[in-house]
Image (spheres, helix red, strand yellow):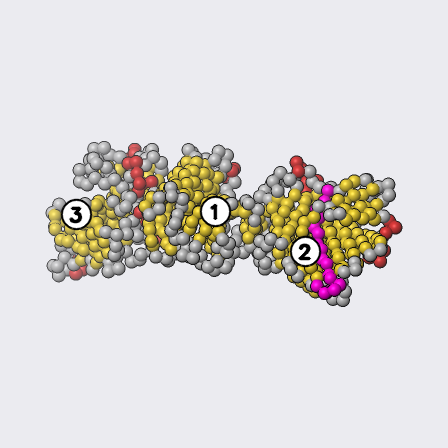
Amino acid sequence: MLAPLVSESFANNASLGQISVSLLTGIATQGSSAATLSFQYDATRDAYTSSEGGRSQTFTNVDIDETQSSDSITTYKKTSKQTTDFLTLSKTGTASGQTRYVAAGFWQRQVNGSLSVDGYFDAFTYGVQTLPISMPRTGVASYAIQMLGASTSGTDVFGLSGTGRLDADFSNGAIFANVNFKEINLASGTAYEHGALRAVAQITEGTNGFTGKLGLEGNEFSGNKSEFHGSFYGPDAAEIGATFSSSDDSAAMVGALWGGRNGYPINQSTNLLNPEHATFFAPISASMKATIDGSGIASGATDAAPISAIYVNRDAMIRLVYYADGHVTNNINYGKLANKQFLANTADLISGLQWDGRLSMGVADAFLYGNMTSVASMPRSGTASFSANLRGTVMPAGEAMRSISGLGSLKADFATARISGLGSYSTHAFSADNLGGYGQATNGNGNWSSNATIGSNSSSFSGDFGTTGALTYNGTIKGGFFGPAAEEIGSVVNAGSNDGGLLVAVLGGARGTDISASQQGLLGLTSSTDLQNVSGDFTITSNTSGRHASVNNTRTVNYDPTSHSYVVKTGPYETGDQSVRTIANITLTDRNAAESNASFDVYHGTNYDAKIYRPGLGNPEIALTYTSFAHISWRKDEVAYPESIQSYVAFGGRTPSYQMPTSGSASYSGVLYGEGYLGTTQGAATLSGTSRLNANFATNELALTLNAIATDKASGAAYVLGNFVYAWPEGYGCTECDRSAFALRSPSGQVVGQFNGPHAEEFAAGFTLNFDPGDGQYTHSSSFAGIAIGKKD
């Protein structure tokens, strides 16, 4: 578009504004719309010709009006009888603020008739459009833009001018423009600062063009009387040109936006929820819609267009949601009519739900976006487990809408590219101002499961999802891994029922506990697994007569089924400096076959001695599937007074919280083992005996009874200590926390425990037992620590 120009019919975008003022009544009628304009240049005459809707005019150099021209525009004026035409063209160039491939034009015609004065205003941009094949289809760009236009209000006519920025997301086709502008009354010369004009659009697939809507600050982009359309210009979409129009019964607006790329750091932000710079996000989403009556009954549920992009601009305090069918919504936050709710906000992942009930068809969205793990950083070996949170919306056929919420676990096997998941859910009465269903009464429950495949050379996955129980729905799950090293997982669910109900939800979370042992049993493990544990420790401090019984639930126990090895480590608080040390590295080469039997495997290492209870049907004492324990004799020599410690560490596959029963009761029978000091003999003794746990899952009340026998280590004499009952008036101590763990007390000591296996099939507990033997020697009171393990009767 740099001179000299050649003869050409320019590709362009145009919008038309019209006004007609009756000379009889003084009443003005107005309108606006997109226009089909022909704009030609004749190099031999140095003339421009504009044609649209039966109107046409040619302008040459002799028509230039120097009084209305400047360094940035050239204005032509031509009068013929009652008709006056103006043509204003922006000047192109290579200087700062100028464009090279696109220009703006304004063709104004006024006809002074005998009955009315009629005005036409064609705003258009024209030039060298980017070839569709050369359009960027990835990445983003920001453009510094200018705006010129005109508006009417009643019989008043205003000139519009302003500057702003247009941001474009080529990957997802989303566009947002924000222009601060002012109006000048052309009759009085009075200027008004008007605020912001905003426009949204989406790029038409396979073209260089885009279409959308116009809105003033605070307004939605859903009106039927506004339009915004344009094209990209120059190589690699270097510049942009667009026109807009909007009208109602008493006012109309029309104008043009044009400009070139700038240096704004779009998409360069570190905060997902409140980006420092304007940012387009590419969400993963699922959407559905249905007719909702006054009682919340859903009918005719169908899939809706998913979300294609989300734009967050902190400078303009705006959040826009772009849908695949071309419509765009502004900030949705209208209480019972429409709302959005963010469910998880971390450094790498945002997930949420959205409800829009303002139209005849209510629309529910589930979405997530964030920093997906790069393909180069995706693990391709090993496994990872994730604690999963399920939240969504259900439209049952012919029933009231519901919210759905639940917990679960997802496990990724990166070597086989497979993901499996399971969990439980509950449903609640739907509330637009509480989309996640937090704290609402349950009106149904059940279980969910999923299986998915990780894409080759990808950090995304897709697969199947289903529910049983109150809802029998089946569908799909799609998502991806987030964070520098796949620390988080996020997905959306889209499922349906046989009778036409639909469900959309988000499902995901951060790295969590591996539940394989709780589902498959200890003997079913195939890879290295961390096992949850509780323990009872009896410690004797050297150089003193100190003896101490304690319980612990902060240690780690790792079992590797391939090498048949166990690694037991301290909790950070045990070392005093928050470090972690290895208590015992129990390997198969340390096993003593002669001392081992059907109940225990015996190990002797360089710095430990250990006995491990054998799980499975072969144990003649009690056959446990999900639970075992290790008795480890070890020393802590790095402290001022070295300690000799007998640790009884019960470990296993702890019941996931979402598999814990919430009704009914159960009793468990088992055994106990321990070590300590028997005041009666004033010597070291071991503990054995039986254990019994009674659980009321409806009221969270637990009672553990230990029937203990002490055996003096020196003499071998056995002493029946009797029954000791541990309970807790408030049961678990909470109803919202992880109910698979428990803590109990009695006058004789304390217990920390856990349920193991699916649906709390087994239990394990570490305990302390402190009491006076009754011989009057209070200074020689008994003290023990140990574990109790058992399974459902």
Instruction: Say if 145 sits above or below 133 in the image.
Output: below
- Reading the image, the residue beneath label 1 is 287
Rendered image quadrant of residue 159: bottom right
Numbered disc 2: secondary structure: strand
Tell me the CA gap for discs 1 and 3.
Answer: 56 Å
What residue type is disc 2 on?
Gly
Residue at the (20%, 35%) spot, across then down: 618
Rendered image quadrant of residue 610: top left
- Reading the image, the residue beneath label 3 is 690
Percent coordinates x, y for residue 403 in the rendering: 40, 52
Residue at the (21%, 49%) spot, across then down: 666
Percent coordinates x, y for residue 451 in the rendering: 39, 38
Q: Left or right: 203 with respect to 185?
A: left
The mark that comes first in sequence, 1 or 3, is 1
The mark that comes first in sequence, 3 or 2, is 2
Tell me the CA gap for discs 3 and 2.
Answer: 90 Å
Q: Is residue 424 visible?
A: no
Numbered disc 3: secondary structure: strand
Nearer to the camera, 675 or 536: 536
- Reading the image, the residue beneath label 2 is 31
Residue at the (74%, 66%) spot, across then down: 190
Numbered disc 1: secondary structure: strand
What residue type is disc 3 on?
Thr
Q: Is residue 324 visible?
A: yes
Other-residue count near label 2 (Cα within 10 Å), few / some / many at <14 / 14–19 / ≥20: many
Nearer to the camera, 9 or 575: 9
